[in-house]
Image (spheres, rainbow, N blue to C red):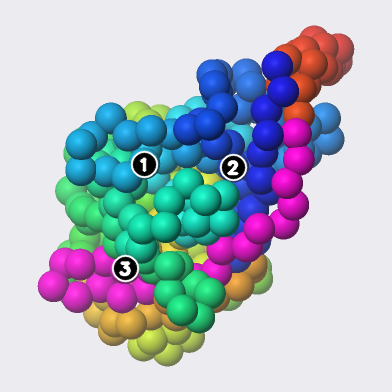
Amino acid sequence: MIWNFVKMHGAGNDFVVLDGVRQNIDLTPERARALADRHFGIGADQILLVDTPLHPEADFRYRIFNADGSEVEHCGNGARCFVRFVHEQGLSRRNPLRAEIKSGIITLDSTGNGDVSVEMGQTRFEPQALAFDVQGLQSTPCADDTLWALPLPGHNDVQLSLVAISNPHAVQLVDDIQTAPVGTAGPLIESHPRFAQRVNAGFMQVLDRHTIKLRVYERGAGETLACGTGACAAAVAGIRRGLLDSPVLVHTRGGPLAITWADNLLHMSGPAVTVFAGSVDIDTLTEQLTTKDFLQP
């Protein structure tokens, strides 16, 4: 079966985008992994599927699959690419658009300067919103936030802010983003047994009250060049800790993202870029990846 696709990125966070409105797309975890594989497939952090909505108030349904095949609730950088894709492919001229995601409906607006602004939806901070088991853990009040001390093997306990923006995020403050243990502590936090649904691990360096640097080890994808919901979570965590004021400019390895949080309304704006379009025989690709996995020692 041949699928047409478009390769896109938002601040270096890259995606394979599929049109499920004009194509019959049965996107299984195995097929998502095959598309995302950077050696045998197209290569991407996430696979985005644009489909007809189930909710009567939405223009489209927008689904997100990580590189490991797991489906997740939200992706801010992907949401911006979703808008660009819908407009460039002629699926709709509406602006703003309302997209149905796994956790609700979000509003997206393509701006005149080429960026896209996304209304990011509900923000929550209680541990149960992240399926986080706090039994026996030490907590410390910090301005309007609560820091949770999470033990990690081979590391000192990390002090985490919990933020759920559809996706779960655990944000820690670091002195230097370049030397932060993203590659070692990130996987331990992401898959820590206290997070029943895993978590995105954010490492935030504060530069001034309106500017931070950020790296994120993403659930099911590893460290990415940018994470939209992670940028929002870090900005909100910094504001709640009393370290930041809205608006916040978040410098990621893939480029800057602008976050505003006021009256409990959270918005993110940034670029969405089309890289190339193509077609793929999804059955052959999936079979090749299955064979490759089988042959691994």
What residue is shown at x 18% (from left), y 48% (from top)? 126
Q: Residue at x 26, y 66 (%)?
A: 266
Q: Amino acid at mark 3?
A: His
Q: Of the residues tagged 3 and 2, which is closer to the observer?
A: 2
Magenta range: 259-279
Mark 3 is surrounded, within 10 Å at the Cα level, by few (under 14), some (14 to 19) or many (20 or more) other residues, namely many
Q: At which x and y percent is residue 42? A: 76, 38
Give the spatial CA distance, label 2 vs label 1. 14 Å
- 60 sits left or right of 239 in the view: right
Find residue 165 and report its horizontal and vertical position in percent: 30, 52
Comparing marks 2 and 1, which lies closer to the viewer? Answer: 1
Residue 3 location (% of width, % of height):
67, 28
Element type at mark 2: strand
Residue 267, disc: 3
- Counting residues from the start of the chain, the first of labels 3 and 2 encountered is 2
**Which numbered disc, 1 or 3, marks the residue closer to the eye?**
1
Is 268 placed left or right of 266 in the picture? right
Q: Is residue 262 magenta?
A: yes
The label shown at residue 60 is 1
What is the three-letter code of the residue carrying label 2?
A: Val
- Residue 17's tag is 2
Question: Is residue 220 at all visible to an observer of this figure?
Answer: no
What secondary structure predominates along the stretch shown in magenta? strand
Q: Secondary structure at mark 3?
A: strand
Q: Residues within 10 Å of mark 2 (few under 14, many from 20)?
A: many
